[in-house]
Amino acid sequence: MGLWALTAAPASAGAWTRPAGSGLTITTASHHAFALSNPDAAFSKIETAIYAEYGLTDRLTVVGRVARETRFRRSERQITKAGATYTLSLNTVSQGWGELEAGLRLNAFQHRGWVVSTQVSAVRSPTDLENGLRAQPVWGSDARILLGRSLGGRMFADAQLAHRSRFVEGGAEQRMDLTFGVRPAQRWLVMAQTYSAWGERSGGSSYESHRFHISVTAPVADRLSLQFGATNSFYNDGLAPERAYMLALWREF
């Protein structure tokens, strides 16, 4: 069961571009557990990632992401020997690069709280669950349209539609990321987000994934904030459901 749609990180930023000369880094540590259809197997991973964006101009922002993963897989099978049945456990651990991304976001339109942007990125994704992280990675592109709306001074909404394709082996994925954010106090941020993906593998089989994420970001120092969040799948077809917890440090400069 492939995990291509789930190895990619959710969008970390919205439709708004950064002011020229300003930037943001988000350093994240997260744990992800996947519910496999095989009860005799288990899969989880720990990921550390750095997401960054920097305003080249007021309308053009460069974005990037680098991640490392440690994957844990356990499988069990029963064997019979000399009339007795034994359970044989196999545990494997692999480490390597997670998803890497580099791209540009362009502010195409902005008026009275509305903003429309486009973003194009080159993406390197790790292989799916059946392969170790040392296997050949998958290179592709991500093109998206981002729509943002300020709802007064304390709320905002963001919608992103994306098409992700592989450079080799075929297969493509459509994505929709929705965000609703509330600022209950200065520099505090509560976000409710959904991440949806529909795709087709190179062999022709299709999959669908929908996840819900909620997080709270609180200030800890000047230009420094701490984020706590959790993700849970609420519908999956052809992919393993996911449950994840994350801790992130936001730094503006």
Image: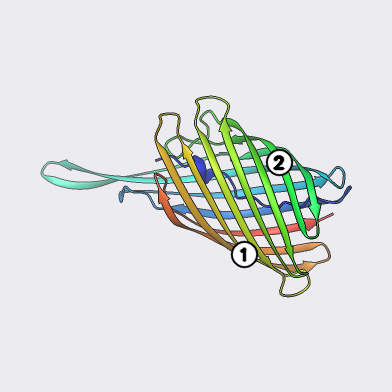
Q: CA distance from mark 1 to mark 2?
A: 24 Å
Q: Residue at x 53, y 38 (%)?
A: 173
Residue lying furthest bottom? 185
In the picture, measured across the screen, residue 232 lies left or right of residue 125, that is: left
In the picture, measured across the screen, residue 160 lies left or right of residue 6, that is: right
Q: Quadrant of the C terminus?
A: bottom right
Residue lying furthest left? 83
In the picture, measured across the screen, residue 152 lies left or right of residue 78, that is: right
Q: Is residue 53 above or below residue 249?
A: above
Q: Of the numbered discs in the image, which one, if any, rests on residue 31?
A: none
How dense is the environment of label 2, judged by Cα within 10 Å: few (below 14), some, or many (20 and up)? Answer: many
Residue 93 shows in this picture: yes
How dense is the environment of label 1, judged by Cα within 10 Å: few (below 14), some, or many (20 and up)? Answer: some
Percent from the top left, x then y, of residue 57? Answer: 87, 44
Which of the two discs, 1 and 2, sits closer to the camera?
A: 2
Q: Which residue is mark 1?
A: 215
Q: Quadrant of the N terminus?
A: top left
Q: For the residue marked with disc 2, what is the amino acid? A: Gln
Depth check: 181 or 50 in front?
A: 181
Tell me which label, 1 or 2, sits earlier in the chain: 2
Q: For the residue marked with disc 1, what is the amino acid? A: Ser
Q: Residue at x 10, y 44 (%)?
A: 83
Q: Are marks 1 and 2 in contact (CB under 8 Å)?
A: no
Q: Is residue 152 above or below residue 205?
A: below
SS category of the residue bearing label 2: strand
Residue 13 shows in this picture: no
In the picture, measured across the screen, residue 205 lies left or right of residue 120, that is: left
Percent from the top left, x then y, of residue 143? Answer: 65, 38
Q: Which residue is mark 2?
A: 119
Percent from the top left, x then y, of residue 12? Answer: 67, 52
Q: Is residue 186 above or below residue 141?
A: below
Q: How is the image coloured?
A: rainbow
